[in-house]
Amino acid sequence: MIDLHTHTVFSDGELIPSELVRRAEMKGCRALGITDHVDFTNVEFVIHQVSKIKELEAVLGMRILSGVELTHVPPAKMEKLATFARRLGADLIVVHGETPVEPVAPGTNRKALEIGADILAHPGFISPQEADLARDNHVCLELTARRGHNITNGHVARLAREAGARLVVDTDAHAPEDLIDRQRAIEIAMGAGLTLERATEIVDHHAIIDL
C-alpha cells in the first residue's frame, strides 16, 4: 500500500506525524505522503514542521514524503503557491479538487491539471477534456477512500480509463480509522468499476513512486 494523501495535527488531522507514520506502517504502508492543507498563510510553517518527520526513514522500512494539499486556493493563485511550495522543499503537490461535497471554486480542477500537480484529489465530476489534460500532463487522478468525496470515484475511474489517465488510490486520512491496508485499497478501486487486475496494478505499482 502506498498512500500519498494524509493529514496531521498541522492542519485538520488528529495525529502528530510520528503516530500517523506508525499507524500507516502497521497497515503495511510502504510509502506515505503527509499532505496537510495549505494556503498562503501556513505553507511555510507546514513544510518546515512536517519535513522533520523524514528523520524516521533511517529506521523504518517506509519512504516518507513531505507534501502539501493546496486547499480552496483561487485558481488564479494556485500556480504561484505550488511553485513556492516546491521551492520550500515540498516533495509532493496535491490539489484539493472539485469534490461535490464542498464549495470548491470552479476551475480548480483545470488549473491543477494545467500546472502539473502531482495528484488531483477527489476531483468530483471531471470532464472528458480534463481527463485528457490529466493524461497529457501526467497528473494522477485520485480514487479516494474518504466518505463523501468517494461518491464520484466511479465517474473518475471511467473517464480516466477512457482517456488513458493515471489513477491512484489514497485515503485522505484525517483520523486513525481512515487508514487502510492493501486489500481495502484494491476493493476501493474495484468498487469504482475497475477489474481486479487493474485495481491491483494501480495499488501495487504506484504512478508517482516506485519502491
Image: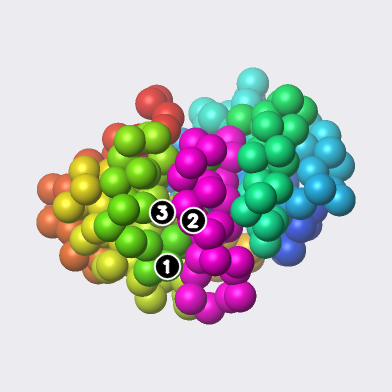
Q: Amino acid at mark 3?
A: Glu
Q: Is residue 27 left or right of residue 87?
A: left
Real-space Cα separation, disc 1 to disc 3, in angstroms: 10 Å
| Residue 26 in view in this figure | no
Q: Which residues are magenta?
A: 92-116
Cβ–Cβ below 8 Å for labels 1 and 2?
Answer: yes
Q: Quadrant of residue 187?
A: bottom left
> Which disc, if any, is residue 109?
2
Q: Secondary structure at mark 3?
A: strand
Instruction: Identify the image quadrant of the C terminus.
Output: top left
Q: Earlier in the sequence, mark 1 or mark 2?
A: 2
Of the residues shown, which amino acid type is indicated by label 2? Asn
Residue 15 - label: none
Q: Picture coordinates of residue 201 (x, y %)?
A: 22, 42
The residue tagged 3 is: 142
Residue 101 belongs to magenta span: yes
The disc labelled 1 sits on which kind of residue? Gly
